[in-house]
Amino acid sequence: MVRTLAMFTDTSLCIGCRACQVACKQWNELGLEVPEWTGGYQNHAHFTDKTYRLVRFIEEPGGKPNGDLAWLLMSDVCKHCAEAGCLDACPTGAIYRTEYGTVNINQDVCNGCRYCVSSCPFGVVSFNESTGTAKKCTFCNDRIHNGLGPACAKACPTESIQFGFRDELVGKAAKRVEKLKAMGFKDAQLYGADAKGFLGGLNAFFLLLAKPSTYDLPDNPRLPQRNVMVDSLLSIGSALVVGLGVLLSFRERGKGGPHA
Amino acid sequence: MTTNLIDMQNSDVIMATSNMAENHPVGFQWVMKAKERGAKLIHVDPRYTRTSAAADIHLPLRSGTNIAFFGGLINYAIAKNLYFRDYVVHYTNASFLIDPAFKTPTDLDGLFTGYDPAKKVYDRSSWKYQVDGEGNPRRDNTLKDPQTVFQLLKRHYSRYTPDMIEKVCGIPKAKFEEVAQLYCSNSGPEKTGAITYALNLTQHTNGVENIRSLCMLQLLLGNVGRPGGGVVALRGHANVQGATDLELLYHELPGYLPMPLRDQHPDLKTYLERETPKGGFWVNRPKFMVSLLKAFYGDAATKDNDFGYQWLPKRASADAYSHQHMFVDMYEGKIKGFLADGQNPAVGGPNAKLTRAAMAKLDWLLVVDIFLTETAEFWKAPGINAQDIKTEVFFLPAAPAAEKDGSLTNTMRLIQWHDKAVTPPGDVHSDADFFCSLAHRLQKLYAGSKKDRDKGFLAANFTYGAKPDEPEMVEVLKEINGVATEDITDKDGKLVYRKGQPLNSFAHLTDDGKTTSGCWIYTGVTVEVDGKLVNKAAGRKPADDKDYLAHGWGFAWPANRRILYNRAAADLRGKPWSEKKKLIWWDANAPGQKPEDKGKWVGLDVPDFNAFLAPDAKNGDKPFIMRTDLVGGFFGPLNDGPFPEHYEPVESPTKNLLSKTQINPVVKIWKVPDQKNELAPVGSPDYPYVITTYRLTEHHLSGVMSRYLPMLAELHHSHFAEISHELARELGIENGEKITVLSPRGKVHVTAMVTHRIKPFTINGKTVHQIGVPWHWGWKGVDELPGSRGDITNDLSATVGDPNVYIQETKAFVCNVKKGVV
Amino acid sequence: MPKPPHWELMIVWYFFLGGIAGGAYFTAAIADNFGGARDRGVARAGYLLSLPLVAVCGLLLIADLGVPTRFLNMMRTLKVWDPMSIGAWIVGVFGLFTFVSSALSLSSSPSHAALRRKIGLVGIFFGFFLASYTGVLLSNSAMPFSAGEGWGKLKHADRYSMLVELLLLAALIAALGAAARPLVSGHFATLFWGGLIGLGLLLPLALDLLGTRARALGALAAALVLIGGFVLRYVVLMSVQA
């Protein structure tokens, strides 16, 4: 693997212009989608098979350092987790990790079992009815393999979305968060920057101005696969109970003779 | 704008009065950069927008009270002694003495001297400086004389107290003082602040005075011509600046030369005499005008025929041919034919119902656009029976920017070239192709004409390059730039320009017919280097440490100057006011104009000044070179007064609390037959709410370039109105339900967006609700996206105008809101 | 916010039939190996029942794919920690066992029978896996409900497992707490309490305890257990995705 690439989305610089969302749609040729009413500017409510970048608009009364209303703007995207639930769940190997550390779905291999959809702790992966396959942000795989940054980062006018080597971006991000804290944003925090943190770190990580749940992000996302061992043991345990029961009943019937 | 967006990163404080983050997101990167460097961002807007989200402080004010607010800041800066005194004394007309007969609204209850209530105009004879024996303005540099502009200004705005601001604008006193202190304290040698504005200030019946009031504040704080300062005029789309420079306007010719008036300018001599001031750079107006006429009419323009001046159309009156006037005339049957090129007035113009009704009275309508707009299909409007329309309508598909070569001049006067990326499909042509082709066809039709008036049109050249109907756009740019019409030599007989060579500078233009220039301010954009034509608009050298203003990227008029009036960045002696705020300065040791001279203005920008005029020379300390008196003007006579004064919008929920003069006394209100322009009385219970109209990042203007593109059109669910939780509660409206917004002119059905971002105001002790409605929607859109279609917001607005430029008042009027579709 | 996979009725049937197939094979193999001579019939019936059921399971699984023609892509990899991957393999492997066991159960040769019993003992594991891995499959998801701690298993067979199910369900509901609300008090509450707990568990348990000698009642109890099993899978899957 070559040096890991990342996207750093600094929500403190986001102005909610949605250039990223549109650039993503345009570059990836994602089609038309009838929006639902979300109560405000945000469309759509969640990631879909045609919306890989999604700018969230969150009204937070009292959320500004001076106590004013905050309108939290955040361009959300697939996190390209170092430990990716979707990738682990994929039974066909369609979901793979590139040499840059990004997570991608090979559309020619995916058979649409949709297990990855529910395995993503962030609800990123979506099922496309017309292709019958799972879809999500590709980190503009075609672009990064041709020396270009992702379309969303390219389109961002305020450098809220930065693209580069992960280690460099993490350093930048840490400095930025300190600065914001000094400016009075007491809840400013990085989300997914720490490679020792949850999911082994996110290759698309964020600077948030409020706690993650405010942005519809889990506070402490975990790999769904963590359940496999416990549940399997439970299964074996219950199998033993049931097996014993069945065994006993047949033993009893075997002993009982014709009257049983 | 006076400055450059890149330079905004140097601001210590930025006051956005427009919604810059949403409407100028790319330029807004420099505001974010300034913020990263520790600058504070104040957002003054009735609505909490994406700009407010990025701001340190959001300050909502009632729509239509901008002058009250800026007047309050001027008052605050003077009262707290926060203004930049050296700058004010030397670089502005603050020290000039005004005619004793001049009286202000303080004395005349909202009026200036000379008001004629019958004609609704001012006699401006007392609005003038006192002059000495030589005709120079009398000054008092101590600023103490009560007749100084400064004292008059101080007295005028002393009424604009924080208490008054609270009552009029609905800004709590403490909040106002917090903002006033923050903004005004960033003034002086070490600090600068920038103010942005856009249609938020212009689209009012006090539009021009709104802008003047902000300019005055900037002068007072020493924020013009200096890094991080400036009046940041944000233009409405990619090429509004270019359209203004080349004057796709009713009242000016290219390069801000007045369009002749029929009665005032019978011949070129009179025109030049009346329009050429005694001082300032505009003394060169004859050179610009003659060069323009030479560019228009070529060899046919000679000294003997006034260079073809008589072939120019003349205006009948000052307001004739302005946008609203034109549609009133059209409705009254005075205009028979209409060519709408890249414009969608059926949606975008004020009082759009009147606009559409007016077009129904035309004999013919030709629409040239990239999509089939509502204007092209006004006869299909909901509720219209096409059989009743007699207008013959033509539509020609046009090529968008990517399908043609050309340039766009953006908001910072930056001319940027673009190459054609793809050839337009089918029978689609660029505007330039269309107009050249049309001109050639018309010339054929007029070919036999013996009439004098047709000679100019027949002489005019519409061929650029080899193909008559497919102009080479670089050739067009060259014509705009200007060329020598014959070999030009210097006094030693050395060839300076050979015939046909593009000119390097507007300083070389002459009034004897030896030069042409289609727009003098653009001269220098295409030059010849080593015999080769160099298009500077195509330059793409980005900013670097040595040149943060990126002089190699495009070409900024005039003369690639990035910050106007930048002489003001240095003190009287030519030294930077401070190291931190240096821009250009006088280098006494630099080689001068002649080999024997020394001394030159040098620095980080091209001097907007005579580069060799020493600070101690005559007028060497006067930076505002475009003004007759060479200084910034606090006192600046316009049609509605030399100082901005607060008047209520034509439609307002309240009486004017500052004076008995309710609205702009010289406002233009068009009388339109058939109740097509009804107005609500002051405080009308039928229309109790203030409404403001605006744009969104996701859509473009009347929606022509966004409603047909699914990836943009889907970003907003449907046409909506933003209303407060308080109003929603009062009216029992749920977020997301359909509501009806009504004005005396019309009504629209929209989705209610109930939000914390809109709050009611307390005006003079009473709650006043304000709502916001974007105006991008029309009845056409993408079939699969029902929300891409919607009612036309401009059906609500009125046909009223500012008395200087006749712009509409669509940012502040009144309405009612009803639950459901009624 | 995590998303449901939008598994619909086909997958409910697959879970259900897979459970029966696994249970039938399990029961058959136990009966074959540990039962008396009279249990041979049970064994044969179990083997023969499991074969078509697992075949239908496979077809359901394929039909539910977004691109059914790519079902073989499941065989490109084997991820032992991935229930979906394992599941796909298990259907195949278990299918093979049911086929062989069924074929052998038709033979009267004692050597065939001995082989069948040995194969059955191995096949039990796969059958059991098929019947119970669906719980792991569901819990191995980011959805808050199924990802809750202590997610129980889908059980079958007779009174023991019914008791176990009741206990496990009680434990599940308790462990899930608020997350179980859609199940116990939401849209699916009636189905859950009436269908699963009442019809599927308590009633058969009561019938079972009342009179094992009444064959009709026994058959009814067995049918009800199956209905209960189906309902359990249905409500769990659907309430997760609601």
Image: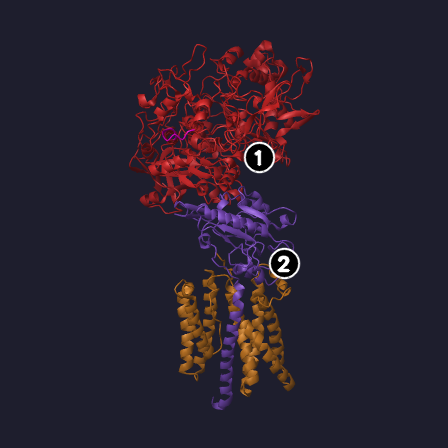
Chain colours: A purple, B red, C orange
Can the viewer see residue A139 in this picture?
A: no
Q: Is residue B34 left or right of residue A146?
A: left
Q: Position of residue B797 (x, y in %)?
A: 40, 32
Residues marked 2 and 1, same chain: no
Q: Choose between B116 and A70: the one closer to the eye.
A: A70
Q: Chain of mark 1?
A: B
Does the residue at mark 2 contact the one at mark 1 (Cβ under 8 Å)? Answer: no
Can the viewer see residue C164 in this picture?
A: yes
Q: Tag 2's secondary structure?
A: loop
- The residue depicted at 45 percent of the width and 55 percent of the height is A213
Residue at image mark 2: A109
User: Dot 1, how many residues are within 10 Å of its Cα: few (below 14), some (14-19), or many (20+)?
Assistant: few
Q: Choose between B141 and A66: the one closer to the eye.
A: B141
Which mark, residue B548? Answer: 1
Q: Quadrant of residue A108?
A: bottom right
Q: Position of residue C35 (x, y in %)?
A: 54, 85
